[in-house]
Amino acid sequence: MFIDRVYRLPRLWANDQLARFAPLFDGHVVNVSAWRDEDKDGRHYRDYFTAAASYEITNYKAEARGLQGVDGEIYLDLAQPLDANLADRWDLVFNHTTLEHVYDLQMAFANLCRATRDVVVLVVPFLQPFHADYGDYWRMSPLAVSKAFATNGLETLYCNYNTHKRASVYVFAIASKQPHRWREPIHAATAPRDSDRDIANDHAGNAGARTLTNRGYRARERIRKILGV
């Protein structure tokens, strides 16, 4: 009842989503723009990827918020063309609630896709109040996320969003350059809780419907149906 519905509730939902899928992926994993790699629930994101062969993090320039001084931390500015040494470097790129803070959104999204040999796991806000004193520029709908993946040569295998009442809405998506490898394990991890709809393709759905209510409109629509007009 007393949980922060604006920021914490969708964060916990996204953590639960990640916990369902992260153990599926082996290989080399990177958390891009990881800051301290904290999930804000007492764990680190590296803890979720239990099968990973390696796990690295990147952050922005030292004078900005970021660059935590962690051993092996990599410098990466998503708003600049990706360094050739980072292209196709990892098997999985993970990025959590960063893209809204990068003004050159198209460049940033493309860089995430260029950095991976296969999978991108992405969390972005769809509905959330303006936040952060270092820039807050964009919101991406589920459809926008999937279209952006397709533009960059990845197929969306899973795209979901939280449906809490009066809460911020996050989009959680998984896309791959080798989708045939992951369709079956992702489907298995998805069922049975989400078996009532096609998560990968339900882009229109009702994203945000429980947050943005319009009681007067809905009442009028019910009356119109009753009257048949």
Image (cartoon, rainbow, N blue to C red):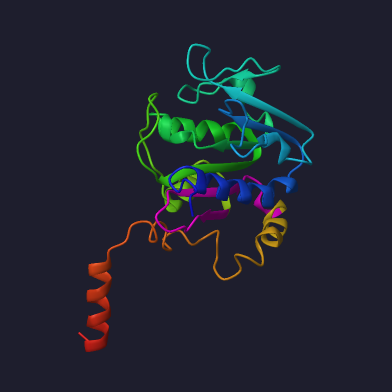
Determine which quarter of the picture holds residue 71.
top right
Q: Is residue 177 above or below residue 81?
A: below
Residue for point 35% across, 37% down: 130
Q: Position of residue 29 (x, y in %)?
A: 70, 34
Depth check: give the residue in front, 168 or 84: 168
Q: Position of residue 215 (x, y in %)?
A: 27, 67
Is residue 163 magenta-colored? yes
Q: Is residue 5 above or below residue 220?
A: above
Determine which quarter of the picture holds residue 199.
bottom right
Could one spot residue 91 in this view of the protein? no
Q: Is residue 143 above or below residue 223?
A: above
- Quarter occupied by the C terminus: bottom left
Left or right: 54 as drawn, with respect to 168: right
Residue for point 50% across, 34% down: 110
Question: What segment carries the magenta color?
Answer: 158-180
Could one spot residue 72 in this view of the protein? yes
Q: Position of residue 226 (x, y in %)?
A: 26, 87
Residue for point 63% across, 65% down: 193
Q: Position of residue 72 (x, y in %)?
A: 70, 18
